[in-house]
Amino acid sequence: MAAATKAIEEAVLAISQARAATRRGQWVEVARGLLWCLVARCDRARVLPLELLCQFGHIELALAGTKEASTDVSEALVLEALVSVVATLGELASTVTAPRRSVWPLLYPKSLHTDLRRFTWRLRDMLDHGSVTSPGQHGDTSLSRALAALGATSGVTWANVKTWHDSVYVLTESWFWLVEEAVDLLDTWENVATDKATATTQAKDLQDKTASLGTAGENLVATARQPLVALAEDEVDSLLATHEARVVAVIKAMEESVVATSQAGAATRRGQRGEEALGLLRRLVVECDRATVFPLELLRQLGDIKTTLLNIKERSPNVPEDLVAAVAEAKRLWEASARLTTHHLLVTLGEIDFLLSSPYGGSGGPGGPRGRAVAERCQRAIEDIPRLLEGSGVTNVISSRR
């Protein structure tokens, strides 16, 4: 009887535990579902800061280009921001390379050249996004056809726009990661500069110390020149031995002083050059941040297109004019940036990569031939921007349509 009662109690306990486990499992599933919901909503919420960044980018570029506060930014300024990143990187590469192998290795570590090459490759991959009309790209041809017959192909239209929008979203995130990489480069070089400044201070301290030793040694030499006639023979020997030791110490101190002076002067020159590179790295961070206005503007334009499509309640062969204009605007900016990259920036980045791959090869250094070539290519790229934008008519002004 007791055994049966115990078995029943164990069965009841097992059922209770099973029910509790089931409830816990259900709660876990509920929590999991809520977490996925949170992830989705957080992802959607990123639109707000991205849109704010876009608007601030517009204002910043407008102020830089017109000296007046405005929310209208020309497409040319957006594309010039891309060229500015490449131009600054080229100037930096020219600064940290040298025509002579014996000069620069002590100033710029090899790791800096390696990091800058890696940064150059990443920038090249981001800029080389291709044309939306190229095979295998974002299907602009099918999108244009779908817009021409929206009543029959609204689903296809939405799919193409969404694909394009998602690609630009990834590009936007890549640009922000590039800014982070530029900041990391700056942090690394600032740490190196701090170490070099400490070494310079130590060299100057050594110079001062050896100079004082030299003065003391000279006084000792003068003292040793006193008349020896009145001294005993053993005193003379002792004085001469002391004199010889002091002279050797003075000579050594003088040699150390010369070396310390040379090191301090070289450290000062290296510090000036290092500060120049540091300034260019800071500028690179700023230019990369300004260039994010390009993907952010595309993201805003495509977001407008998606919103317009969502607001179309009924199928109709008459495509809204603002939808056609929005697609043309996004296409124009995307295509112009692709042509800018193909015709100018890829070749220029190749020149920069060559500079960094052979930092002591003879064509680098401030004012070197390859550095000048990079600067000239960037200038030609800026001058060519209006022509690159002519593919879809006159240069358009991007405005925040709210």
Image: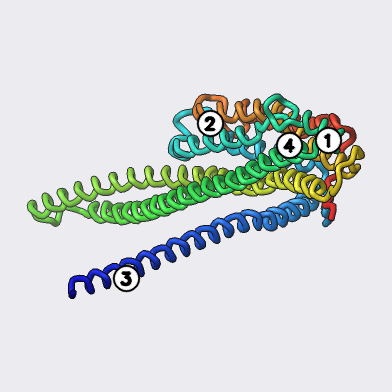
In the picture provided, is 277 more to the left or to the right than 210?
right
Q: CA distance from mark 3 to mark 2?
A: 76 Å
Q: Residue 152 — which label?
A: 1
Q: CA distance from mark 2 to mark 4?
A: 40 Å
Mark closer to the chain start, 4 or 1: 1
Q: Closest to the observer: 228 or 90?
A: 90
Residue with the mark numbered 4: 160
Secondary element type, mark 3: helix
**What amino acid is labelled 3 in the image?**
Val
Residue 381: % across, % down: 74, 31
Q: Number of labelled discs?
A: 4
In the picture provided, is 182 more to the left or to the right than 11?
right
Crowding around mark 4 (Cα neighbors within 10 Å: few <14, some 14 to 19, many 20+) is: some
Residue with the mark numbered 3: 12
The quarter in which the N terminus is drawn is: bottom left
Which-is-in-front pick, marks 3 and 2?
3
Q: Closest to the observer: 364 or 320?
A: 320
Q: CA distance from mark 3 to mark 1?
A: 63 Å
**What amino acid is labelled 4 in the image?**
Asn
Mark closer to the chain start, 2 or 4: 4
The quarter in which the C terminus is drawn is: bottom right
Which-is-in-front pick, marks 2 and 4?
4
Q: CA distance from mark 4 to mark 1?
A: 15 Å
Q: In the rendered view, tell whether residue 189 sits above or below residue 92.
A: below
Mark closer to the chain start, 3 or 1: 3
